[in-house]
């Protein structure tokens, strides 16, 4: 191969006491998709930020297109032809989709004025290529997380780049969109563009990438062609454990189906309607049952989960807990009646970054821990210690600020926040999003365990997880229930069929052979 | 409790403004002469506008506005009023607004000696004559930009305060000055008058501090507290209005001083300050009489009656001293 | 694109919005203008030509023109996610400097204040944009500083500088074209130019982008956020400075006490105009409506003539709350 | 982004952290030392007491402001609330001092209720409270007919000027309020809720916390504290002055809070820092007056100190 597009040599980066990167070197060639994997907190995002000038490394050099470079910031890197999708999609939510797509490379007329109509036209065209059909004048923030992620991808890819960096681009995408992305990457490679691809989904590594590098605790522990390493080998490298030990775990850590039996549902939501989002969805959860919500991006899974929890006002529908119909329904009441939710958007709606792990865990339990307005310290510390141990949350102390934890551990804190309420029903919206393979397995095992103990779970997750973990699957399409599958009926193909039933060309199911 | 500034009702006739001197009598202003001629009017048939400049937050302003209103009512003249809340732009807009509303004559109490040009111009264009009171528009011409002016000589007030201070202190000791609001010509004049007079008299009094009290009681108190804490030697305070002086009295009381320990001389003549003389806290008050109503409307009447109005009518301000304070208390406002 | 996708997207397209929500959206966007029209109607019915006469409208326009200049700059600042509390003091400082500089002719009277105000804006911008200090505190400090400097230049207010009446600046400032004051024309011209900059240029779009989130997203999108912030604060100071120069020209003098509380009035106008105080969304058109609304209300309260100034405050404060309350209610309905 | 860029903190991490936590104490120390050396009669008990008495109302208002800012809000109406309280006192003194004070404090609570209600409804705090900044002052003036009223009530005078064990009552009150606030933030569920609402409002909502009630309560506290400050001020100057009581105090209070290290973004509150911030501002004013500097100089010095103090804290507070 000729000269690499970008080459990082012996990069080191520290944050206060923590060494985020330790002598990491990486070569990115033209026309290759290079996977970067590793556990939460391994340093992947940090490496990307060093490459694009967000962070300055303490040590090491970067060569780009044959020359040593030191970008002063993302703008600088972008000008040089490095286009980046940072982790956690965060574009400008109040601006239109079109503006978001072209910010920084706005189309202007000869008078140096914005060419709005051209902007709109091109935006619509670009998005169509990714199968996204939205009115590009709509504010981005009105769209779901998945769509926003697609816009971010389109934005990065449509720039004239020599190197495209993607930090977990698919964390909120449904299989169909992931397929589209794979196609796009293929096209980019043919054009000789280098791609750095960060993901926790190992399937994608093997499907999309040619080479893979593994980071562990800030050090590069493996780099080489994808075809020379097995899935198990990759996991072992990430975890730093012998292959044999890793082999014992399956694809997911869900066990066998649970004893649901004929128990009456603890939670029953009937004909939920919310303008533009839900058109009469019904869900039932029995004690010990894991009910999965399946569907495409924007099909209304999160909307359903939130509606069941009372997070958004309903236009119509009813919620019944343990046989009692509820007239007023909001998160506070839901929690009091034993229905708890861990939201999808961890950062925006989950953690309170400035508060300690202890305070974050006991936030929802405050009313129960309070006597005469004062928090009972003993009861609080007991709960906090118990859950930190039980969920294996990695913290330096319960006083540590949650904002300083890595993504996976933040997620566990949120789980603990709800679990310490001893709920009857737990709603989990993508509980394993952006979480490394080890942590993911722990959370899956935990869900299993809780269900065994009689907890009802409403789970929004990747198809694979739903198939393996759920006892019942409600398949959603455009805000309506397209069907309900139970026990043995549950399978990827069956679910895709239900999803695709209304799609005249049936393209949705395209690539899901197991 | 005692509400401040509601005194004029029981004030005797001698409380009203008296003319001390007039100037510019050679060319008295009449409708023909006023800025190339304005129409003659009967005040009873038109609306008169009054533009107040500052918040009606101290007895001076309360009395001033009330006096205008009372006199208009007494004469059966229709009056509209505005208050600029110490905002120059608002005063301009207020005046222009009143002209637009059909006011045919205006009485204005300018916020400052400068800056009302656009309002004056609007009045000229509409041929609406303006009588000014209190603060003098120093760089404008009488009978051209405005009809005439009635008010006190602020520099002289300051000089009289200096005289009173010399008497009260026996011309020795350290004086602190509580300045009025910054950027207002009243403050400038009263400071200049005071200091110049001390110099002219070769006074031995030493001005050790000059701090703004913004013409308010609260600021006057807070500043005095700091000043006497830093300079226990201060033996006299010149307050440029009564509100600040009363604030200073409160500060002295709180610091455990006795009446007369620190000599206070102040300007305005509010009831509270004159009472302060009676109580021994204040040494002297130079009056600044705000009862402009009778003289202002008389001037308008004279104007339209072709008797003419002098460019400047300076009123004679009284002086309250321990000797006359008790007797004059009813005349204070 | 396949039909399937088109179908799927359909429920989310605005075309699917009900008539009611579209009306609400419209009302929020043009809420201030709507209320303005109502208030003006009410005013002309109640007060007739006293209100609608050219003299009165001209007075409102003149008074509004200074606020419009300040509020235009404030709109940029707020859109970018900031706030500028220093404008009232900067306006006063500018007036003082204009009068001071008038000894060197019109050029001095215009350039000196604008240069100093631009510098203050630059300091604001650098502290907010580069040092990342909270705009509220930074501009609170410059509020104090500019006022202090204004007093220092005018020797604690002892010296009021006068602008000679024969100076071109004074003549222009006090002139009017077809009955419309020159300051009004200048304010409108600046406003129109600002409109083009905000809505039709790259810079304008990026101002919006900088105000989304805490500006971090915009930074990662490769936008020079710090630079945008700096420019926005410089613009705001310059426009406040221009207002100061025009007031000085109008009043032929520079007073250090001018413009106290103007910053809050400008902020109120911007917010009434529908711009989000948190940044990222809003419009200059709304700001114009907001400015006019405030000034018209003030004028109407004056028309009542006998209302004491205390009641004026009660009415305008209550009105401010009512307007934002109505807007919030409309926005709420739209979100559902 | 997930993690904020924290450039520059790497090298001198320790030093910078120290500065950001103790910047206000440092500034205070410097200013105190200056005064001890260069200001005649500064180091006297009487002078110290004076500074504390003068700062007490600002401190009390600032403590309420700190709690409001902790929720990510701001309360511009505190000065007008003080004025309303001041205006009400003489109207109800006929029923005795305590009923009058109760009315004044209730009025403060009412103002807070309106502010809190508007904010809980979703109106941006600056605008919501700006409305009452304007209207509240007007109401106070209407109530008092625009006039200053002298008050000769011994109870009020004692509240404003009395002492317990040589410590002035206003100072004791400020300290009591500070202690209560610190305790609530540390130990009470309400304190956690407040910080959660400020740190991440949607998260607090989804955790089932009564977000609206928390907001309303915080603004009511701020209103009540402002009213108390109004009562103190009125008592101390033996006059109810609705025109000037509390004028512009919102700016001093916000400055004290921010200089004291509480980020405007919410989610964290520093009580001691707020007290120190208020004291710092007070000391600046005292220094300027006692050295007979010009008012204009005072403003410029204040500006410089504010910027320096927040600059020192910039990494930590994330403002
Ligand atoms: N701005 C920062 N300040 C302090 N520590 C940081 C900062 N950014 C990253 N870190 C730390 O550096 C380490 C590497 O973090 P990084 O975000 O690169 O991990 P990652 O591999 O992207 O993890 P994930 O899969 O969860 O996204 C972590 O320990 C993290 O806590
Ligand atoms: N193709 C699309 N076109 C327009 N809007 C979409 C589309 N897909 C999703 N949305 C937006 O997503 C919202 C509903 O998505 P919701 O979050 O419930 O979906 P989901 O199934 O949880 O998907 P995800 O969370 O992965 O985005 C809608 O309100 C809509 O704004
Ligand atoms: O003369 C008056 C009074 O002294 C008042 O106290 C302030 O304004 C001045 O014009
Ligand atoms: Mg990462
Ligand atoms: Mg979802």
Image (cartoon, coloured by chain):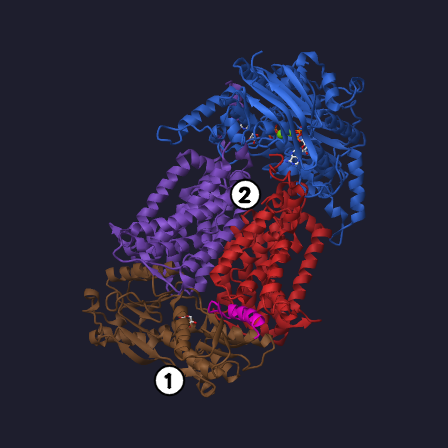
Q: Viewed as shown, does residue D123 lie left or right of A449?
A: left
Residue B220 counted in the magenta span? yes
Element under disc 2: loop
Which residue is disc 2 drawn over? C131
> Between residues D178 and A148, which one lies in front from this camera angle?
D178
Question: Dot 1, crowdedness within 10 Å: few (<14), some or many (≥20)?
Answer: few
Residue B14 tag number: 1
Q: How crowded is mark 2: few (under 14 residues within 10 Å), some or many (20 or more)?
A: some
Can residue C249 be seen here? Answer: no
Q: The blue chain is which one?
A: A
| Chain in brown (letter) | B
Where residue C136 appears, as percent x and y from the top left, is 53, 49
Figure chain in purple: C
Q: How many labels does the image show?
A: 2
Magenta range: B209-232
- Please tell me the numbered disc located at residue A15: none
Q: Position of residue A137 (x, y in %)?
A: 46, 31
Q: Is residue D37 above or below residue D305?
A: below
């Amino acid at each position: 191969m000729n000269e690499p597009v970008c080459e990082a040599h012996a990069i080191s980066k520290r944050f206060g006491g923590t060494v985020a990167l330790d002598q990491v070197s990486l070569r990115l060639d033209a026309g290759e998709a290079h996977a970067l994997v590793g556990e939460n907190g391994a340093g992947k995002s940090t490496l990307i930020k060093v490459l694009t000038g967000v962070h300055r490394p303490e040590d090491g050099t970067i060569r780009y297109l044959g020359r040593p470079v030191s970008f002063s910031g993302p703008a600088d890197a972008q000008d040089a032809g490095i286009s980046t999708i940072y982790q956690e999609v965060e574009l400008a939510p109040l601006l239109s989709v079109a503006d978001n797509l072209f910010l920084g490379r706005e189309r202007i007329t000869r008078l140096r004025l914005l060419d709005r109509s051209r902007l709109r036209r091109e935006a619509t065209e670009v998005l169509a290529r990714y199968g996204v059909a939205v009115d590009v004048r709509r504010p981005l923030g009105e769209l779901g997380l998945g769509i926003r992620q697609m816009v971010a991808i389109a934005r990065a890819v449509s720039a004239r780049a020599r190197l495209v960096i993607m930090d977990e681009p698919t964390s909120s995408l449904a299989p169909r969109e992931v397929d589209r992305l794979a196609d796009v990457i293929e096209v980019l490679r043919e054009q000789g563009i280098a791609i750095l691809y960060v993901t926790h989904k190992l399937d994608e590594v093997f499907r999309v990438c040619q080479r893979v590098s593994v980071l562990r605790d800030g050090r590069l522990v493996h780099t080489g062609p994808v075809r020379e390493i097995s899935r198990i080998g990759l996991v072992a490298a990430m975890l730093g454990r012998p292959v044999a030990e890793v082999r014992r775990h399956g694809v997911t850590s869900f066990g066998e189906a649970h004893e649901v039996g004929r128990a009456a549902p603890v939670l029953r939501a009937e004909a939920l309607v919310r303008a533009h989002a839900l058109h009469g969805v019904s869900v039932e959860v029995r004690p010990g049952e894991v009910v999965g919500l399946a569907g495409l991006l924007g099909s209304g899974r999160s909307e359903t989960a939130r509606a069941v929890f009372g997070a958004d006002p309903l236009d119509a529908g009813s919620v019944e807990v343990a046989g009692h119909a509820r007239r007023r329904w909001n998160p506070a009441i839901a929690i009091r009646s034993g229905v708890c939710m861990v939201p999808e958007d961890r950062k925006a709606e989950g953690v309170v970054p400035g508060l300690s792990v202890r305070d974050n865990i006991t936030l929802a339990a405050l009313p129960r821990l309070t006597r005469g307005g004062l928090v009972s310290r003993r009861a609080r510390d007991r709960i906090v210690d118990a859950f930190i141990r039980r969920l294996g949350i990695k913290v330096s102390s319960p006083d540590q600020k949650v904002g300083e934890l890595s993504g996976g551990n933040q997620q566990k804190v949120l789980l603990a926040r709800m679990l310490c309420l001893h709920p009857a029903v737990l709603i989990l919206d993508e509980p394993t999003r952006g979480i490394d393979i080890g942590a993911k397995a722990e959370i899956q095992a935990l869900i299993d365990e809780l269900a065994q103990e009689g907890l009802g779970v409403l789970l929004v997750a990747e198809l694979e997880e739903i198939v393996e973990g759920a006892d019942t699957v409600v398949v959603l399409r455009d805000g309506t229930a397209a069907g309900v599958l139970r026990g043995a009926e549950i399978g990827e193909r069956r679910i895709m069929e239900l999803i695709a039933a209304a799609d005249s060309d049936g393209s949705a199911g395209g690539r899901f052979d197991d | 409790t005692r509400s401040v500034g509601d005194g004029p009702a029981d004030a005797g006739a001698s409380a009203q403004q008296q003319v001390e001197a007039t100037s510019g009598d050679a060319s008295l202003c009449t409708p023909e002469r006023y800025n190339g001629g304005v129409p003659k009017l009967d005040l009873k048939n038109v609306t008169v506008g009054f533009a107040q400049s500052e918040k009606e937050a101290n007895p001076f302003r309360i009395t001033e506005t009330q006096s205008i209103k009372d006199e208009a009512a007494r004469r059966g003249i229709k009056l509209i009023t505005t208050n600029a809340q110490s905002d120059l732009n608002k005063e301009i807009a207020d005046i222009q607004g009143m002209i637009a509303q059909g006011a045919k004559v205006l009485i204005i109490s300018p916020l400052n000696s400068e800056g009302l040009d656009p309002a004056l111009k609007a009045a000229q264009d509409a041929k609406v004559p303006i009588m000014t009171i209190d603060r003098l528009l120093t760089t404008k011409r009488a009978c051209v930009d405005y009809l005439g002016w009635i008010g006190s000589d602020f520099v002289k007030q300051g000089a009289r305060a200096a005289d009173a201070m010399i008497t009260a202190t026996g011309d020795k000791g350290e004086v602190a000055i509580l300045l009025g609001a910054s950027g207002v010509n009243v403050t400038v004049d009263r400071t200049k008058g005071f200091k110049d007079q001390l110099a002219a008299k070769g006074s031995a009094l030493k001005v050790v501090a000059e701090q703004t009290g913004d013409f308010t009681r609260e600021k006057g108190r807070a500043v005095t507290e700091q000043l006497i804490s830093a300079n226990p030697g201060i033996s006299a305070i010149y307050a440029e209005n009564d509100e600040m002086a009363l604030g200073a009295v409160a500060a002295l009381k709180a610091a455990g001083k006795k009446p007369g320990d620190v000599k206070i001389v102040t300007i305005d003549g509010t009831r509270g300050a004159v009472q302060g003389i009676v109580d021994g806290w204040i040494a002297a008050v130079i009056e600044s009489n705000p009862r402009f109503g009778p003289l202002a409307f008389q001037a308008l009447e004279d104007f339209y009656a072709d008797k003419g109005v002098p460019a400047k009518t300076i009123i004679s301000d009284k002086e309250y001293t321990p000797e006359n304070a008790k007797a004059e208390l009813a005349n204070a406002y | 694109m396949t039909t399937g996708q088109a179908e799927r997207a359909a429920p989310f397209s605005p075309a699917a919005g009900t008539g009611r929500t579209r009306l609400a959206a419209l009302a929020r966007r043009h809420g201030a203008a709507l209320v303005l029209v109502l208030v003006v109607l009410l005013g002309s019915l109640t007060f007739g030509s006293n209100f609608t006469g050219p003299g009165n409208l001209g007075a409102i326009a003149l008074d509004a023109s200074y606020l419009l200049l300040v509020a235009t700059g404030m709109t940029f600042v707020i859109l970018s996610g900031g706030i500028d509390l220093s404008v009232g003091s900067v306006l006063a400082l500018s007036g003082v400097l204009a009068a001071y500089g008038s000894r060197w002719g019109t050029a001095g009277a215009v350039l000196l204040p604008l240069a100093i105000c631009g510098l203050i804006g630059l300091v604001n911008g650098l502290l907010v944009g580069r040092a990342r200090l909270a705009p509220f505190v930074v501009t609170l400090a410059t509020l104090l500083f500019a006022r202090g400097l204004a007093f220092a230049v005018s020797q604690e207010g002892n010296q009021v500088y006068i602008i000679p009446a024969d100076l071109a600046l004074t003549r222009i400032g006090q002139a009017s074209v077809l009955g419309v004051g020159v300051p009004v024309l200048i304010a409108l011209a600046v406003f129109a130019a600002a409109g083009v900059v905000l809505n039709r240029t790259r810079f304008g779009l990026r101002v919006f982008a900088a105000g989304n989130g805490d500006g971090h997203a915009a930074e990662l999108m490769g936008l020079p956020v710090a630079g945008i912030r700096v420019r926005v604060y410089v613009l705001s100071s310059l426009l406040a400075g221009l207002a100061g120069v025009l007031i000085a020209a109008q009043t032929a003098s520079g007073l250090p006490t001018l413009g106290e509380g103007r910053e809050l009035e400008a902020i109120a106008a911007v917010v009434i105009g529908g711009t989000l105080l948190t940044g990222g969304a809003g419009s200059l058109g709304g700001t114009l409506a907001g400015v006019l609304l405030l000034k018209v209300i003030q004028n109407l309260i004056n028309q009542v003539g006998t209302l004491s100034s205390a009641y004026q405050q009660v009415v305008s404060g209550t009105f401010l709350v009512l307007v934002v309350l109505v807007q919030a209610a409309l926005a709420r309905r739209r979100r559902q | 982004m997930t993690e904020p860029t924290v450039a520059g903190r790497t090298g001198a991490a320790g030093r910078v952290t120290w500065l950001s936590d103790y910047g206000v104490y440092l500034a205070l120390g410097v200013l105190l030392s200056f005064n001890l050396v260069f200001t005649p009669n500064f180091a006297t008990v009487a002078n110290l007491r004076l500074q504390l008495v003068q700062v007490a109302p600002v401190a009390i208002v600032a403590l309420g402001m700190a709690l409001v800012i902790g929720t990510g809000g701001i309360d511009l109406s505190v000065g007008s609330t003080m004025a309303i309280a001041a205006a009400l006192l003489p109207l109800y003194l006929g029923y005795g001092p305590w009923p009058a004070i109760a009315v004044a404090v209730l009025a403060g609570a009412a103002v807070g209720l309106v502010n809190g209600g508007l904010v809980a409804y979703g109106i941006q705090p600056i605008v919501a409270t700006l409305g009452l900044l304007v209207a509240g002052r007007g109401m106070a003036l209407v109530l008092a007919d625009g006039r200053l009223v002298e008050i000769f009530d011994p109870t009020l005078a004692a509240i404003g000027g009395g002492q317990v064990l040589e410590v002035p009552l206003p100072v004791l009150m400020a300290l009591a309020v500070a202690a209560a606030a610190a305790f609530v933030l540390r130990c009470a569920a309400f304190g956690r809720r407040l910080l959660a609402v400020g740190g991440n409002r949607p998260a607090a909502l989804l955790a089932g916390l009564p977000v609206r009630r928390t907001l309303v309560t915080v603004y009511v506290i701020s209103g009540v504290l402002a009213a108390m400050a109004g009562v103190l001020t009125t008592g101390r100057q033996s006059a109810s002055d609705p025109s000037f009581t509390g004028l512009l105090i919102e700016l001093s209070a916000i400055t004290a809070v921010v200089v004291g290290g509480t980020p405007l973004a919410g989610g964290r509150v520093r009580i001691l820092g707020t007290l120190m911030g208020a004291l710092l501002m007070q000391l600046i004013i005292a220094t300027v007056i006692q050295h007979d500097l010009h008012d204009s100089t005072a403003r410029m010095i204040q500006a410089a100190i504010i910027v320096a103090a927040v600059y020192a804290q910039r990494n930590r507070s994330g403002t």
